Amino acid sequence: MAKTYQIAVIPGDGTGPEVVAEGLKVLEAAAKKFEFHLNFTHYNIGGDNYIATGQILPDDVVESLEKVDAIFLGAIGHPDVRPGILEKGILLNMRFHFDQYINLRPVKLYEGVSTPLKNKGPEDIDFVVIRENTEGLYAGAGGVLKKGTPDEVAVQESINTRKGVERCIRYAFDYCRKRNKGKKVTLCGKTNVLTFAFDLWERAFYEVAKEYPDIQTDYAHVDATCMWMVKNPEWFDVIVTDNMFGDIITDLGAMIQGGMGIAAGGNINPEGVSMFEPIGGSAPKYTGMGIINPMAAISSGQLMLETLGETDAASLIEKAVIKVLREDLKDIAAGKMGYSTSEVGDLVKEFIENQP
Ligand code: IPM
Ligand code: MN
């Protein structure tokens, strides 16, 4: 019997719904081709719903999300809601609640997409960042004293547990082995200053590395990582890093792979419910204009199928993305795709449908 996956869809705010619609279009085409079913259930969560109802992430929603095979998310963030409320209340809350301890962010320059890096091409820019996704500065440890007075004190601490660090590092090595490309994992840290946190990371890294004699290890401080990502991106295969550094370097990664319209991501709990999202935000000022590139959402769908084990369908989506980027779309980086958001989705979908 054909397999059916229960997928929760959270289109969210701004341009989220527009790109999610294209992601779903493509997912459906891929499922049809490979004879499995995707049962989509939509959830109205995000800034508009918060403004209308005062609810951020209701318990009954969380309860039903616990039963799905995966979550497909558009974007969270609303210009009329104070920064932090939705991000912490929805996005981070879900990452923590579902223990999605991996944030997987491929940085891959496809043919036909321009990069701001001079003299670098698709053969140079193809690596993956494995970002720890439940700890570090994001854990919310700390507090404030005497707020609003001249004596105010604000403390925000980075939490690093042996368990959390080790499982992330192990995932990175496993992923590197499976990816079978450069066979190298680079730890991105700051051992010269953050001597407690990254000492733990470093020890865990080299201990885990012993279990993977086929994989080369490397280390780079986070500032140097930024430099090498611009100067010699071809040096990287898999980068593993903490939550905050991973957040920062993956925006840089998105830029060198052609922009936020391309960059896909997965919040992964290998033993639980994972959530897939384009890493660009809700882009409120472009909402409803049909000009946002849906490729990041489409590639997030690809990552979702890969994680669900539908690897052939995932590969076909990538093949379609490659074809459309190479042959159809114009200057993405300049914001001129030559097609509307939904036309781009149609091109990808048609390629999939037309495969033998
Ligand atoms: C990301 C985003 C989030 C993060 C924000 C919206 C909380 O920037 O997914 O990278 O910092 O993780
Ligand atoms: Mn970010």
Image (cartoon, grey):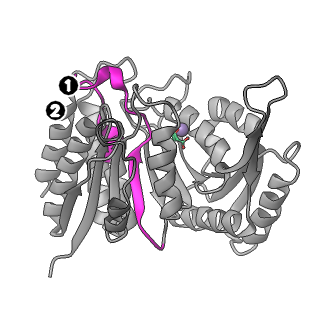
Note whether 314 is above or below 44 in the view shown: below
Q: Which mark is residue 32?
A: none
Estimate how packed mark 2 is, as few (under 14), some (14 to 19) or many (20 or more) residues with alpha carbons within 10 Å. Answer: some
Residue 31 position within the rendered picture, expressed as x and y whole percent measured from the top left? 18, 62
Instruction: Indicate left or right for 140 with 177 as reference.
Output: right
Instruction: Indicate left or right for 280 with 131 as reference.
Output: left
Residue 116 position within the rendered picture, expressed as x and y whole percent measured from the top left? 52, 22
Quadrant of residue 321 within the rendered picture: top left
> Label 2 is placed on what type of residue?
Glu
The residue depicted at 12 percent of the width and 52 percent of the height is: 353
| 54 within the magenta span | no
Q: Is residue 236 visible?
A: yes
Note whether 244 is above or below 227 in the view shown: below
> Given contact means CB atoms under 8 Å apart, are the residues at marks 1 and 2 in contact?
yes
The residue depicted at 77 percent of the width and 66 percent of the height is: 204
User: Which residue is identified by label 1?
Assistant: 339
> Label 1 is placed on what type of residue?
Tyr
The residue depicted at 23 percent of the width and 36 percent of the height is: 18
Q: Secondary structure at mark 1?
A: loop
User: Which residue is identified by label 2?
Assistant: 343
Q: Is residue 179 visible?
A: no
* Magenta residues (range): 271-298
Instruction: Name the one closer to the observer, 302 or 132.
Output: 132
Estimate how packed mark 1 is, as few (under 14), some (14 to 19) or many (20 or more) residues with alpha carbons within 10 Å. Answer: some
Q: Secondary structure at mark 2?
A: helix
Image quadrant where one finds the C terminus: bottom left
Residue 279 position within the rendered picture, expressed as x and y whole percent measured from the top left? 44, 40
| 291 within the magenta span | yes
Instruction: Name the one closer to the observer, 181 or 86.
Output: 86
The residue depicted at 25 percent of the width and 32 percent of the height is: 327
> Whole-Å distance between the Cαs marked 1 and 2?
6 Å
